[in-house]
Image (tube, rainbow, N blue to C red):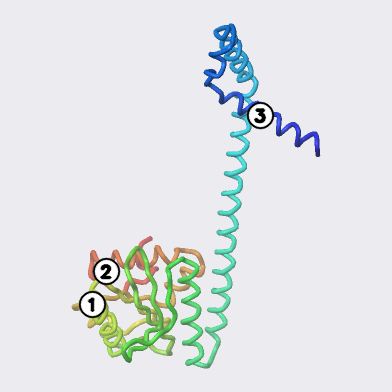
Amino acid sequence: MAQKQYTEILLKLAQDICQFNNFEHLAHIDNSAEKIRLAKNSVNHLKQFIVPYQDAQQAEELRKEWKKVAEEKRQIFKNYQEELLSLKQEFYSLATSQDNQQRGFKLENLMNRLFVLNDLDPKASFKVVGQQIDGAFTLDGTEFLFEAKWVKSPINNSDLAIFKEKVKSKLENTLGLFLSIDGFSEDGINASQSSDKVMILMDGSDLMAVLEERISFIDLINRKKQIASREGRIYVPYSKMGV
């Protein structure tokens, strides 16, 4: 241990010497020109041995850094997959529940965890000026209000209209994401996309595509937003996106 410590000290000393390029302190002694020449030659000679060592040392440090970064990325991906698996298992469990109210609350919690997993700066269920908001998140600088429903029939126009007004009451660039596990009625979709397109719609098949890793949540929302912007369609399930 001591020998290794001394070796490291000597190597550090040699590296410091190799950085030395100012010999003015020798200018005032006898035979200064010769002594400066010898000092420069000695430093250059030492560099022949130290520079390759420094290059190898830097290469090794770089290799270790890349290995560390790769391991961190691997661990992040592993944690992501484990959390996604946990969410999928919870979703399967909720699918067999007969308690609609509890199932709705737990769906909100599941989605909030999904927002957290994707670093979307989420806000859980909250009330503001008499409005109940199931959640909110931020994606690429756009604020989204979130609504989740898990009932036994498609969501109709009345629920969509209420949510649309909530979104419209916020800043102009705010959008809404409405998740209905059992989808939406035709009249609700048509009424909601006829004017004031301020939300996009997501159903249970979309959520399963995310939980089964066929598409990431962020890519799903960006694709839905793109279709709504370009084509005016606010409800296009993953299976019909052509991705």
Q: Residues within 10 Å of mark 1 (few under 14, many from 20)?
A: some
> Is 226 situated left or right of 26 in this image?
left
Q: Answer above or below: position of 193 versus 3.
A: below
Residue located beneath label 2 in the image: 228
Q: Earlier in the sequence, mark 1 or mark 2?
A: 1
Query: In the rendered structure, are the residues bearing label 1 and label 2 in contact, judged by CB atoms less than 8 Å apart?
Result: yes
Residue located beneath label 3 in the image: 13
Residue located beneath label 1 in the image: 193
Q: Cα distance, mark 1 to mark 3?
A: 73 Å
Q: Nearer the viewer, residue 101 or 52?
A: 52
Residue 174 in the image: x percent, y percent?
28, 73
Of the residues shown, which amino acid type is indicated by label 1?
A: Gln
Tell me where residue 180 sits by quadrant: bottom left
Of the residues shown, which amino acid type is indicated by label 2?
A: Ala
Q: Residue at x 37, y 75 (%)?
A: 202
Q: Secondary structure beneath disc 3? A: helix
